[in-house]
Amino acid sequence: MAKFDSETAAKIHRHLHSHLPSDPALRVKALESLVVERGLVSSETIDAWVEAYSEQIGPMRGAQVVARSWLDAEFKARLLENAGDAIKDFGFEGNATGHLIAVENTDSTHNIVVCTLCSCYPFSILGMSPSWYKSAQYRARAVREPRAVLAEFGVELDDNIAVNVWDSTAEVRYIVISQRPTGTDDLDEPALAALVTRNSMIGTDRILSAGET
Amino acid sequence: MDGIHDLGGKQGFGPIPIGDNEGFHHDWEERMWAMARCGILPPGTAIDQFRHGLERMVPTDYLSFAYFNKWCANYFMFYLNAGTFTNDEVLNGHCDTPSDPAKTLSLDQVVAAQRALVTDFSEPTDAQPRFAIGDTVTTKRRITANHTRLPGYARNAAGTVITHHGAHLLADFGAEGIHQAQHLYTVSFMATELWGEDANPIDTVTLELWESYLV
């Protein structure tokens, strides 16, 4: 590739800061026009990616993985051993799941995931991350005062439940496996998956509802 | 470098915008994300170069820009750096000399392409690991690399190795365009070690740390 130099990057960013229009919609439109006109990608291919992430690649994938872990002890053991391999059962591997770790909540532990340095996220099983996950507030506070952060999400934890915060600083990504809600013995995998919230797989939700039953 | 991106533990940010649950608010955000799936950065651009590029944004922009607006700025930066587009083309939003259009991929093709994006960042190494699971390790106090994944809040702190991942491509080198692996560990720190007596004594914070981050 072209030589990439840290100071040059900063210099170009300062130039862009002074010269580009401030409206992000206009900036992205300009970028798309440029890459399409240069023949790097077609607008229809961009449409297809938008559709893929709105219809097929999202937290319903992770929810199905969690539900199966509740139903199938052998699968759960493989998931906790190597989640990146286990999700291949579903064909859910992809962007940012090459080194996936599943961490399990118990009566005495709660897990919560953050990326303080950027906003790393296991896109292929959870889809696009919620805006709050990418916010400066969450990135700054989740490591320092996770209990206060959890309380804002409505998760009140006793002092004797340990909070483990996972700051994904390398290419390892995390998914939190919540405890199966009580009163769900009769539910099958799709019904259980419907109970798994996106936030529970990040760790900002803990007690899942057994639903309308 | 100790840039504005190193947000862990910084105080004064206020409540989490918990109601902001959607991944995207605007079409332009979806389209920026979609473009970024297409592998159209200058050939050979490493993920750590992309991250480091974001870290070199004007600091006030880094804090105030919407997430995908930062990505857009970073794309322009890489394209200007590589000469993919001229300054005038970027400012005008059009190419002076258009090229042949790219081939279009169908929904099924992009879903398959997404699946193929799974990437193994581990590499074989002859180097013996310096640490083993259960070892107590201490992080470095100072970092001089342009790009590091050792956040400021976890420096000069003692923790316990809980996982050894083998060797993974070192982010510090990746940002320099150097493809070299180093042993990577998951290290668990007691919250009290990082934040003092205000923290709950049973809580932990866990990070992935390369061997050169450890004393």
Image (spheres, coloured by chain):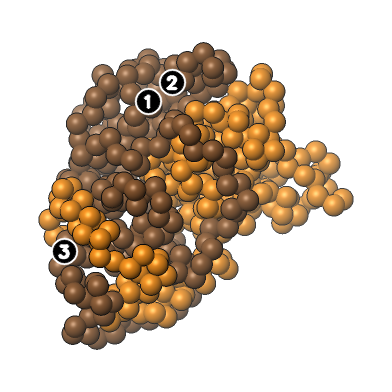
Which chain, by letter, is brown? B
Point out residue B184 in the picture as x, y percentages from the top left corner. 32, 32
The answer to whether residue B165 shows anywhere in this view is: no
Q: Earlier in the sequence, mark 3 or mark 2?
A: 3
Mark number, residue A7: none
- Residue that numbered label 3 is attached to: B82
- Residue that numbered label 2 is attached to: B194
Which residue type carries mark 1?
Ala
Q: Are marks 2 and 1 in contact (CB under 8 Å)?
A: yes
Which chain, by letter, is orange? A
Quadrant where the N terminus of chain A lies?
bottom left
Q: Are marks 3 and 2 in contact (CB under 8 Å)?
A: no
Within-10-Å neighbours for mark 1: few <14, some 14–19, many 20+? many
Within-10-Å neighbours for mark 2: few <14, some 14–19, many 20+? many
Point out residue B79 in the picture as x, y percentages from the top left corner. 22, 65
- Residue that numbered label 1 is attached to: B154
Q: CA distance from mark 2 to mark 1?
A: 7 Å
The answer to whether residue B93 shows anywhere in this view is: yes
Circle count: 3
The residue sitting at 40% across, 22% down in the picture is B161
Q: Earlier in the sequence, mark 3 or mark 1?
A: 3
The answer to whether residue B210 is above or below residue A79 is above
Chain holding disc 1: B
The residue sitting at 33% across, 40% down in the picture is B4
In-image side of B147 versus A5 (left or right): right
